[in-house]
Image (tube, rainbow, N blue to C red):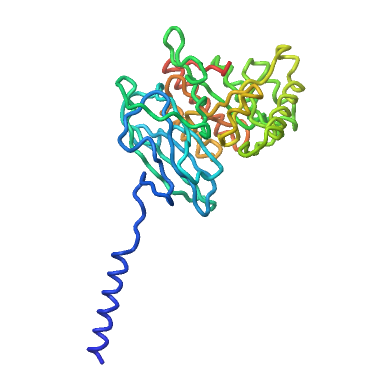
Amino acid sequence: MPVHRTFFCRLLTLAAILIIGFSPQPAAAGQQSAFASGIVTPPAGAAVRGIVPVTGVATGADFAKWQLDLLPAGDAERATFLALGERPVAATDALASFDSAPYADGAYTLRLRVVRRDGNYDEHLTAITIANRAPAPASRPATASAARLVSSRAAALGLPLRTAAGQPILYLTFDDGPTPTLTPQIVELLDRYDAKATFFVVGLHLRRGLAHLRPVAEAGHTIANHTFSHRSLVGRDQAAFAQELDGVEELVRSAAGDLLPADFSLAYLRPPGGGVDANTASTAAALGYRLVGWDIDPKDWRRPGADAISGTVVRQAFPGAIVLLHDGGGGSQQTVAALETILKELSGQGYLFRALP
């Protein structure tokens, strides 16, 4: 019996080894197949310049959303948001395009995160080199179905990165307000540093208190559209899309029309969550809007602490960067405290703070 038992145990061990040896292994980051998510172009190791289209696949059984970022030298702490989609991309297609001009030449990593409904995600990395000063291989132009926020950067919006005297400019933006507590505190801080900013307002919040927007208008900041309900614009038809935007403009006129030019109209739209699909840019343009994303997101809505918020912005700042903060939608006294540090430290570095015109 002991001999038989020993022989049987050895058979089980051998079977386990064979099973493990032939079990499928997860694909390496950046690999692509008909069934796996990942970045397809630019290929790993590519040198790029100008408008760079990024294609790939982003799908899965428990798909929630995908997000594409650019990491300088692979540093996740300095990640720049490129695009986000709330619908799966099941076939190789354009995910986004970005302009390489604002970035220094060197090594970067494209990071595609495919988020599942439970909050976990798969991450796909592709190393590239930005080579603005040297010829790079010609890139395939983005297709018409690109889900992108090409106009998210100040340069792509035609805005200056520096003043005529060479001082760097930072574009501060505040989302999801106005609110009765945070908005006036933020306006007061901006005034103290002779800074201007852009406030992307949500209609539902504005409707609760029209007077909360008046400090923004009185101080000469730019007011922009963040939709009426803060629901995603992805997949919305043009009528529903227009209703989301027109409702906000009507409320802005009611709240501060006497402080605005007679021919005033909102010019900029930030889609909730940065979510776009193939029709977002064209529908927004037909309604007279330009899409605006962001370059720096300290995720102040998570309330990681004022030092963490300000540290991210100060560390990642570069001329022409668009910064995402919140005077509503999770913004808090942490955001106010962080803003004071941001204004103090970056003004000390020579930055000026401007609104989108």
The residue at 69%/36% (across/down) is 229
Which residue is at the far right? 254
Q: Which residue is drawn at 32% across and 27% down?
A: 137
Residue at coordinates 34% horizontally, 57% vertically from top-left? 25
Give residue 92's quadrant in the image.
top left
Furthest residue in direction top, as rendered: 165
Compared across the picture, whether 288 is left or right of 314 comes to right
Q: Where is residue 176 in the image (x, y as percent from the top left)?
A: 63, 32
- Residue 291's spot in the image, x, y percent? 57, 26
Quadrant containing the N terminus is bottom left
The quarter of the displayed image where residue 242 is located: top right
Q: In this view, does 162 lie to the left or right of 24?
A: right
Q: In this view, does 98 lie to the left or right of 209?
A: left
Residue 4: x and y in percent read: 25, 88
| Quarter of the image that includes the C terminus | top right
Is 320 located above or below residue 226 in the figure?
above
Is 189 or 153 nearer to us in this picture? 153
Which residue does the image show at 59% across and 33% down from the upper left? 279
Horizontal and vertical percent for residue 95? 48, 37
- Front one among 329 and 305: 329
